[in-house]
Amino acid sequence: MTDTATHELVITRLFDAPRELVYRAFTDPDQVAAWFGPVGWSVPRDSVDMDVKVGGHQRFTMVNDDDATMNSPVSGTFTEVVENELLVGEETADNIPGLPAGTKFSLRLEFHDEGGKTRLVLRQGPYTAEVEGMAREGWTSSFTKLDALLAA
């Protein structure tokens, strides 16, 4: 019996940086390349192409640091954009273990001011329970790299 894609990943995370800086880390191609991807994976800057507006796109490729033949392209379209507050988009999964190629899922990022810090609320899915767990682990690992970037 296979698990159906009914699970939504929800992560709430407090970053020790102003909301504008955290938002920029998700929307500036140089910064996305500097932190995105779990530890052991990187995003080559030349793979990042972003047009952050409603109907715009976000495309890049995560590459395994030890084996460049292992990669995961990301391709999304922005459906809602409120500068420094909200990013909503739809993505198509390719090369994601546990998901058939072409699977569509949504990503919602809310940026809340918490007295000079930023509370990020991330919602992504739907996923199977297994893929939701892998996505949670990947985001959590990526956020350690984002913490370091924001502290610099």
Image (cartoon, helix red, strand yellow):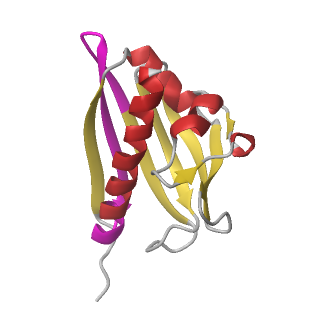
Residue 147 in the image: state x and y as whole percent: 39, 31
- Callout count: 0
Quadrant of the image occupied by residue 108: top left
Q: Which residues are magenta?
A: 110-132
| Residue positioned most to the bottom | 1
Q: Is residue 82 magenta?
A: no
Q: Nearer the viewer, residue 31 or 67?
A: 67
Is residue 139 depicted above or below 151 in this figure?
below
Is residue 33 depicted above or below 7 in this figure?
above
Q: What residue sits 47% from the left and 21% below the top?
A: 152
Q: Judge from the rendering whether residue 86 lies leftward or rightward of residue 56; answer left or right.
A: left
Q: Nearer the viewer, residue 55 or 3?
A: 3
**Dominant SS type (magenta):** strand
Q: What residue sits 56% from the left and 29% below the top?
A: 27
Q: Is residue 52 visible?
A: no
| Residue positioned most to the front | 66
Q: What residue sits 51% from the left and 74% below the top?
A: 100
Q: Judge from the rendering whether residue 31 lies leftward or rightward of residue 13; answer left or right.
A: right
Is residue 41 depicted above or below 149 in this figure?
below
Q: Judge from the rendering whether residue 64 lies leftward or rightward of residue 86; answer left or right.
A: right
Q: What residue sits 32% from the left and 84% below the top?
A: 2
If the image is split into quadrants, where does the N terminus sit?
bottom left
Q: Is residue 21 visible?
A: yes
Residue 18 in the image: state x and y as whole percent: 37, 14
Is residue 85 depicted above or below 120 in this figure?
above
| Residue positioned most to the top | 115
Quadrant of the image occupied by residue 8: bottom left
Residue 150 in the image: state x and y as whole percent: 44, 23
Residue 82 in the image: state x and y as whole percent: 47, 22
